[in-house]
Amino acid sequence: MPSLLTRRRLLQIGVAAPFVTRALAQATFDYEVVVIGAGAAGIAAGRTLQRLGKSFVVLEARNRVGGRVFTDTSLGEGFDAGAIYIHWAETNPWREIAQSLGVATLDSSSVPGSFRLFQNGETIQRTNPRAYERLSERFDPDIAPVPDEPMTVRVAGDGADALRAVSTLARMALGEEAERVSALDYARLWSGDDLLVPEGYGTLVTRAARELPVRLNTIVRAIDWSGQGVTVVTDQGRLRAGAAIITVPVGVLRAEGIRFTPRLPDATLRGLEGLGMGALTKIALRFDGARFGVPEGTDLWDVAGPRATFDFECWPFDRNLVVAVFGGDHARDIVRMGEAAAVDLALSRFAQIAGADARKAFLGGRLAGWSLDPFSQGSYSHALPGHADARALLAMPVGERLFFAGEATGGENFGGAMTVGGAFLAGEAAARAV
Ligand SMILES: Cc1cc2nc3c(=O)[nH]c(=O)nc-3n(C[C@H](O)[C@H](O)[C@H](O)COP(=O)(O)OP(=O)(O)OC[C@H]3O[C@@H](n4cnc5c(N)ncnc54)[C@H](O)[C@@H]3O)c2cc1C
């Protein structure tokens, strides 16, 4: 029979055991937190953890930070290959970050701009401008509740022009075909003023990461979250941490770019299954200074078929560039053609409008094909019809040590989903939750 002393001893050991275990386990961790991905969300998480005095590292697959915010200068003049607008600046944290870093911004309404519409190079008129106006009413929850149904179904009773308008809107704003997007998810987006960053949104985001411990060229392959903490397996070795903030895009998670052991809970998987990635795509064309009579800031919209619309943004910030923007299945097909063929196609379509001199003045082009980019696998997320709860499911912490954050989990109750600002707020919230 154990003596009183022995029993007390046993009791003490029993009470102390959890603390001993935790202390021992912590001693084996390399960091308190590992952040995966150095886009807007990962940068926000890192800045927050730094402010809170936590030990952490940010692992990034690419040879640069910024993710889908990237100012590409390879043509000699910079253009933003991903995000360009600080959307809804009233609530967007990047406005203040730009101010604090001394990076200039411009109200987008103060930038010169005009709009011209073409069909295969020939000027056409908009048939029914009212169809576009009606769209905003259909997706405004203050006017009527918006159901979790395909965007196309939402306007089905409004006639063929409304259907065409919603299809173009979804392709050019979300990069996706309207029938694959939840009307409710679209209706939840913030709305407000937009700012532009003349130096490049990518330049701003890169500067915001300057003080962070980021390991570039480090691809995370697997996360083991059995037992305590997490073991993160990368192509540069493995490390242990108390928790992981995972900011890789939904496209990467859906393609099982990171293997989880044990498998993720059903709720998280349901969240992932309910989200798709659009294919908003850009092709930048560099010219030698010729402007073909097109003023700075002109948007030339070229409709070459029911699904094939290009928006040529001409001479942004007075640079000798035309940036073609397009989305949906048409964009996926073009990205699959490869850069040389895609650039040639964009140049041909631009030359139909600007004239044959465009080819003579052409110096080079770049394709930003996010749909085939291995580290994004799409441009940005949307909830599929019937899955408006998907973002909330993905945002739920797993086992108190896996925290998914990024544009897909939005920020501010998902009103900022899809955006750089929303990604930042989501990364910040995840870091505070850890
Ligand atoms: C063409 C285009 C135009 C856009 N326009 C706008 C706009 O005007 N305004 C706006 O607000 N938003 C816009 N967006 C959306 C915006 O870019 C994104 O919402 C935002 O940048 C997402 O940030 P994030 O941190 O969630 O993801 P990301 O920026 O994708 O960051 C995730 C990071 O994880 C890394 N990663 C991926 N896999 C791994 C791995 N296995 N191991 C380690 N690292 C990995 C990636 O390389 C990346 O750096 C646009 C996007 C595109 C593509």
Image (cartoon, rainbow, N blue to C red):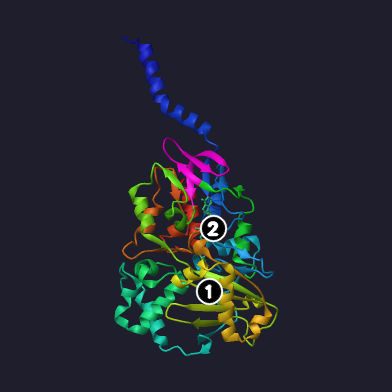
Q: Position of residue 211 (x, y in %)?
A: 64, 51
Cα distance between the residues tagged 2 and 1: 22 Å
Q: Residue, x 51% and y 39% (percent of image)?
A: 241
- Magenta span contains residue 16: no
Which residue is label 1 attached to? 325
Question: Badge 1: how crowded within 10 Å, few (<14), some, or many (20+)?
Answer: many
Residue positioned 63% across, 78% down in the render: 315
Q: Residue at x 54, y 45 (%)?
A: 52
Q: Is residue 360 above or below residue 428?
A: below
Residue 416 rendering spot, x and y as whole percentages? 45, 63
Q: Amino acid at mark 1?
A: Val
Image quadrant where one finds the N terminus: top left
Residue 17 occupies which quadrant of the picture?
top left
In-front residue for pair 94/42: 42
Give the labeled residue for mark 2. Answer: 40
Whether ligand 1 has any atom under 8 Å from the Cβ at mark 2 is answered as yes
